[in-house]
Amino acid sequence: MKLIIAYFRPEQLNAVKQALYAKGIHSMSATNIAGSGRQKGYTETYRGVIIEVNLLKKVRLEVAVKDDKAAEAMDAIADGAKTGKEGDGMIFVLDIADARRIRTGETGAAVFG
């Protein structure tokens, strides 16, 4: 089992969800976050004061899948999130030691149906 964590632009969330749905992956969690990477932020002027914005709005998406679906899920996320510009995001994959569905008590890979 794998946990895929992806960070990308908020405006790409709908495209990423649609790409995952097309691959049959429907279980996910999305969180609005602020972060910085190679983009390093930007500066703007507000009422004559220069403000440096270092933390940019991003989405953190978490998807747990069986091992054989991990590459497919990563490809779907990358396809949906890609704009070709710096700041498109990152994808990380972690191993899941175990999982349990609270309602039924199912454990392991059975949780992912």
Image (tube, rainbow, N blue to C red):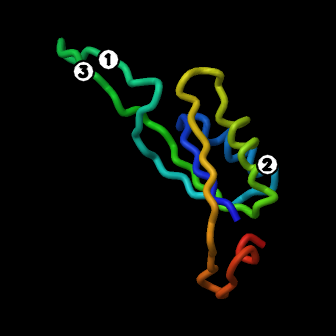
Indicate whether 56 appears above or below 101: above
| Chain-order first, disc 1 or disc 2 | 1
Q: What residue sits right under mark 3 in the picture?
A: 51
Q: Is residue 97 left or right of residue 69?
A: left
Where is residue 85 shown, x and y percent of the image? Answer: 59, 21
Q: Residue furthest left?
A: 48
| Type of the residue with mark 3 | Ile
Q: Is residue 43 left or right of residue 66?
A: left
Residue closer to the observer: 113 or 26:
113
Mark 1 crowd level (few <14, some 14–19, many ≥20, 10 Å Cα): few
Residue at screen point 63% across, 52% down: 93
Name the quarter where the N terminus is drawn. bottom right
| Chain-order first, disc 3 or disc 1 | 1
Indicate whether 23 appears above or below 84: below
Q: What residue sits right under mark 2 in the picture?
A: 72
Residue at screen point 43% across, 36% down: 57
Q: Nearer the viewer, mark 1 or mark 2?
A: 2
| Type of the residue with mark 1 | Thr
Are dots 3 and 1 in contact, CB under 8 Å? Answer: yes
Tell me the element at label 3.
strand
> Residue 45 lies in what quarter of the image?
top left
Residue at screen point 71% across, 61% down: 65
Q: What residue sits right under mark 1 in the picture?
A: 43
Where is residue 110 shown, x and y percent of the image? Answer: 75, 77
| Chain-order first, disc 2 or disc 3 | 3
The answer for how far apart the CA atoms under marks 1 and 2 are is 38 Å
Q: Nearer the viewer, mark 2 or mark 3?
A: 2
